[in-house]
Amino acid sequence: MSQIPTLEQLHALGPLQQPTYPDQGAVDAAVSRLKTSPPLVFAGECDDLTAKIAAVTRGEAFLLQGGDCAETFDGVTADNVRNKLRVLLQMAVVLTYAASVPVVKLGRIAGQYAKPRSSDMETRGGVTLPAYRGDAVNGYDFTPESRIPDPQRLVDVYNSSAATLNLVRAFVTGGYADLRQVHTWNTDFVQSSPFGERYEAVADEIERALTFMKAIGADPDEFHRVDFHSSHEALLLEYEQSLTRIDSRTDEPYNVSAHFVWIGERTRQLDGAHVELLSRIKNPIGIKLGPTTTPDDALAYAARLNPDNTPGRLTFITRFGADKIRDGLPPLVEKVTAEGLQVAWVCDPMHGNTFEASSGYKTRRFDDVIEEVQGFFDVHRSLGTWPGGVHVELTGDDVTECIGGGEEINEAGLANRYESVCDPRLNRVQSLELSFLVAEMLRKA
């Protein structure tokens, strides 16, 4: 049995991107509360996702992972959760139908409340305060009271995640995810776009196929529900360690805060606390690999995080940037493939393509996002390997946070509805457009 490292052992490794709490007693109280809280997910569900990602690893399925850059407590509403779920279901339908490949659906949801930051402090108008690190740590308002890290927020993350998962499970099993609902997933602002019209055409074809299936007496359960899993970056050690438990079936440790957790670009030190903790759990896990990653680094991560070379256990999520993907990715894929390592390759086309617009908003160009995905597919096609999925920051709402796309959002238009508390997200029309473009790439792959 793998032992769960204690918080003391993890902190002895000098973890990065952790909040500095002013009251250790309050931290201890929050940790105690979390340690006695019921699991948010179950080990068997995690094993099921591992099997699905193993199919991705073999080139038999495609992973769609998406959701908010950073969830907020205020965002835990039925409408907000439904809108995020809806856009992911629409994207999955497009990918499945247009590319004829099973799609593994994985939300950045029910736990994505913390974000790493490039600086511990933020200065505005001569006033310096702790940086906002997500609702899991402190408040967004730029006041001394709001920005003090509060460990009670870890308990709030647990409660908000539980509420979100309850909503997701109700939607996916209660009829909302039924394929016969494909038309009702569309709304006016999507229907008025070219990609909304393309989606409606796909929905018409699916409806005709379903009518035929029903006429011949075929009505499988898969038409009426979907498997949908949760994921987030395993960043805050107090939260992740407290929700790591020994499974009674197997005597093995699982992180029961999400089905899938990943290590970010800023916390992937090979001898660091985040790698140590995730090396012990049996969930499927991911690790972000940026342009500084060497082929030997990739081999070392695989050896540490997946020593048994189990298919579905490890996903490499690459985030190079549109201008670096074609040069930086091939050496990694070549060496990993030559060593016979079982990993799923997934493209994060968001985090390497962020810049500040002239208006001061942090944004991304839709064309850069597509260019990085295209480069990802081109590299894998040239090497004879499988481009296993995409990992995107998106929302089901009609926001204006990323430039371009079919709606032709420009820098001046960012101010119309910029709602993200951290990084810019694709809106629903842009997300749907992305799914059609990726489907075309998949057909060629």
Image (tube, grey):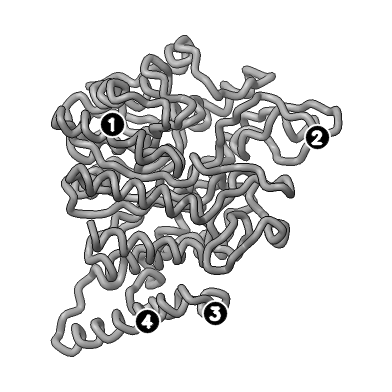
**Residue 205 % position (x, y):** 30, 82
> Element under label 4?
helix
Q: Who's the residue at 21% across and 85% down the image?
A: 214
CA neighbours of label 1 inside 10 A, class few (<14), some (14 to 19), many (20+): some
Spatial distance from mark 2 to mark 4, Cα to Cα? 50 Å
Residue under numbered circle 1: 332
Residue extending farthest to the bottom is: 215
CA neighbours of label 3 inside 10 A, class few (<14), some (14 to 19), many (20+): few
Q: Are marks 2 and 4 in contact (CB under 8 Å)?
A: no
**Residue 250 % position (x, y):** 20, 32
Residue under numbered circle 3: 192
Three-letter amino acid code of the residue under disc 4: Ala
Residue extending farthest to the top is: 12
Spatial distance from mark 2 to mark 1, Cα to Cα? 44 Å
Spatial distance from mark 4 to mark 1, Cα to Cα? 39 Å
Q: Quadrant of the C terminus?
A: bottom left
- Mark sitting earlier along the chain (2/1): 2
**Residue 352 % position (x, y):** 49, 40
Spatial distance from mark 1 to mark 3, Cα to Cα? 42 Å
Three-letter amino acid code of the residue under disc 3: Ser
> Element under label 2?
loop
Q: Are marks 2 and 1 in contact (CB under 8 Å)?
A: no
Residue under numbered circle 4: 201
Q: Who's the residue at 52% across and 31% down the image?
A: 33
How many numbered marks does the figure carry?
A: 4
